[in-house]
Image (spheres, helix red, strand yellow):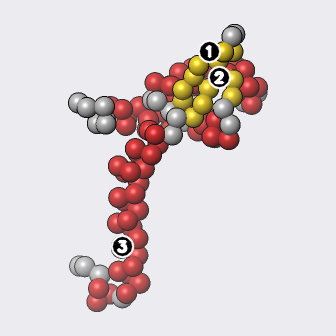
Amino acid sequence: MSAGEVNGSDDDLVFKALASPTRRRLLDLLRAAPRTTGELCDAVPDLDRTTVLQHLRVLERAGLVTGRKVGRERHLSLAPLPIKRIHDRWISGYMAAAVDLLERLDDGPEHTPR
């Protein structure tokens, strides 16, 4: 498999990561700006640090978050390419089909396949 190719298990990891509202919340925070692990933990006070770190590990395994150590801190950033890959592979194709169907319905029953 070349560097540009992705197998289905990579997509499975992304879908699994995105399935959690907590992980989506963390991604939203990182979309706004890179943050340290401590800042992310502070931003979700309803969860303990260990739970936040477990969620971050799932996001990192899926390739949605990248981190680098700066002194004692770990700086995390959103890595949007896996989401773009999901969009390109799954969402855009289904969206185009839905728009096409709506256009055909708008044209009337004589243009709608039976």
Q: Are marks 1 and 2 in contact (CB under 8 Å)?
A: yes
Identify the residue under disc 1.
69
Mark nearer the N terminus (1 vs 2): 1
Q: Residue at x 45, y 29 (%)?
A: 62
- In terms of secondary structure, where does tag 1 sit? strand
Residue 68 in the image, given as x and y percentages of width and height: 59, 19
Residue behind mark 3: 100
| Quadrant housing the C terminus | bottom left
- Asked which quadrant contains residue 32, the reply is top right
Q: Residues within 10 Å of mark 1 (few under 14, many from 20)?
A: few
Which residue is denoted by mark 2 in the rendering? 75
In-image side of 112 versus 62 (left or right): left
Q: Quadrant of residue 44?
A: top right
Q: Locate residue 42, reporting x and y percent.
A: 76, 26
Quadrant assignment for the N terminus: top left
Between circles 1 and 3, the one closer to the viewer is 1
Q: Secondary structure at mark 2?
A: strand
Say which residue appears at 38% left-offset and 51% top-offset: 88
Residue 38 percent coordinates (x, y): 72, 20
For this view, does 86 lie left or right of residue 78?
left
Instruction: Say which amino acid is labelled 2.
Output: His
**Does label 3 or label 2 sit earlier along the sequence?**
2
Distance in Å between CA atoms under marks 1 and 2: 6 Å
Q: CA distance from mark 3 to mark 2?
A: 43 Å
